[in-house]
């Protein structure tokens, strides 16, 4: 089915703004099956994410550019969490038949420019029209180091860290759903939910600093990702409530409306910051300002299984996976 602008004309307009395909083979070869944020074949990291209108983005909340940015970030964060750098993309676009010609044109421009400004070559894809909008990207990247960072790399004694502050996306969504009149009062939270801005080279930087533990992005909420990491590594994790890096704007918004900021930080999805462990004996992060979002130690990997949190009141509680669900 062709879109109103004409499918071939639309594709031509997108490709005209995209980067040419460069020759960039992986420096290191390796293979990984399903189980991490990316698979790996012959050295290529590969991931695939979908963004569905009404589930991941809403055009009455987002601009076309924000909707596309959020989709691209969700893919790039997977490559980053493996210590990789994205190189090539194949993108499928389903245009909502109700979108205006201007919206469709802006989506196409945002797709082309969004990949190009990140140094990612758009090498293929497909376009259709349907009853709701959808973006589908397969993204390929290469490891910054000799080996990828994986979920199963945590060992007892490792420190557990979060790169960046938490709760921003969930708090922004809460405002849009419950107090849309406050959108201009908390623009950083709303904007982060609609189009997250992360350190997209964070995983590659961690690999360059010598991090060799486990790593994954926080797309389904910290409580879920901690349990995923513990399960994949067959270890336990102990965290401290007082060390969870709740974003300052989340704290301000929560105080304003009397809601629990820890719930946003622990259980909110679509954060895309990195959760990782590190076995380095020396604390390399306070002395290094290369990670723009900051690095926060939240706990320790231990023998056993499951995740426990030492609460501010002194009690120790199990952390259940409160997974962000798209179903």
Image (cartoon, helix red, strand yellow):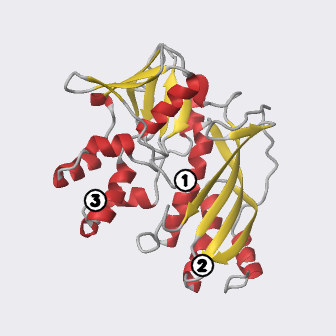
Q: Which residue is mark 1?
A: 73
- Does the image show residue 211? no
Q: Find numbered disc 3 in the image and state the secondary structure of the residue it sits on.
A: loop
Taking the image as shown, residue 21 lies to the left or right of residue 232, namely right
Q: Find numbered disc 1 in the image and state the secondary structure of the residue it sits on.
A: helix
Q: Residue furthest front?
A: 327
Taking the image as shown, residue 6 lies to the left or right of residue 318, namely right
Q: Position of residue 129 (x, y in %)?
A: 66, 77
Q: Dot 3, crowdedness within 10 Å: few (<14), some or many (≥20)?
A: some
Q: Earlier in the sequence, mark 2 or mark 3?
A: 2
Q: Position of residue 84 (x, y in %)?
A: 65, 39
- Does the image show residue 230? yes
Nearest the camera: 113 or 139? 139
Quadrant in which residue 153 is drawn: top right
Q: Which residue is mark 3?
A: 186
Q: Position of residue 176 (x, y in %)?
A: 33, 64
Quadrant in which residue 293 is drawn: top left
Q: CA distance from mark 1 to mark 3?
A: 21 Å
Q: Which residue is mark 2?
A: 104
Q: Residue at x 69, y 65 (%)?
A: 92
Q: CA distance from mark 2 to mark 3?
A: 29 Å
Q: Residue at x 33, y 36 (%)?
A: 245
């Amino acid at each position: 089915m062709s879109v109103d602008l004409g499918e071939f004309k639309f594709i031509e307009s997108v490709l005209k703004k995209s980067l040419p395909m460069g020759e960039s083979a992986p420096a290191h070869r390796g293979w990984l099956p399903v189980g991490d944020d990316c698979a790996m074949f012959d050295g290529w990291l590969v991931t695939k994410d979908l963004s569905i209108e009404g589930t991941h983005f809403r055009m009455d909340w987002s601009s076309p550019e924000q909707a596309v940015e959020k989709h691209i970030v969700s893919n790039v964060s997977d490559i980053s969490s493996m210590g990789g750098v994205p190189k090539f993309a194949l993108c499928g676009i389903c245009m909502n038949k109700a979108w205006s010609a201007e919206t469709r044109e802006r989506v196409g421009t945002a797709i082309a420019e969004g990949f190009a400004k990140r140094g990612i070559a758009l090498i293929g894809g497909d376009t259709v029209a349907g009853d709701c909008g959808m973006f589908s990207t397969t993204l390929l990247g290469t490891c910054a180091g000799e080996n990828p960072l994986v979920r199963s790399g945590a060992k007892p004694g490792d420190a557990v860290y979060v790169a960046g502050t938490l709760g921003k996306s969930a708090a922004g969504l809460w405002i849009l759903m419950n107090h849309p009149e406050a959108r201009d009062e908390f623009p950083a939270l709303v904007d982060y939910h609609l189009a997250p801005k992360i350190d997209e080279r964070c995983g590659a930087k961690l690999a360059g600093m010598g991090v060799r533990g486990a790593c994954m992005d926080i797309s389904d909420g910290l409580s879920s990702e901690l349990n995923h990491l513990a399960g994949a590594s067959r270890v336990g994790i102990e965290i401290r409530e007082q060390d969870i890096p709740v974003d300052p704007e989340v704290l301000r918004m929560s105080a304003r409306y009397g809601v629990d900021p820890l719930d946003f930080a622990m259980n909110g999805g679509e954060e895309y910051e990195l959760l990782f462990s590190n076995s380095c004996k020396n604390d390399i992060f306070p002395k290094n300002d290369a990670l723009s979002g900051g690095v926060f130690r939240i706990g320790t990997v231990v023998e056993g299984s499951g995740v426990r949190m030492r609460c501010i009141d002194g009690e120790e509680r199990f952390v259940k996976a409160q997974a962000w669900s798209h179903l």
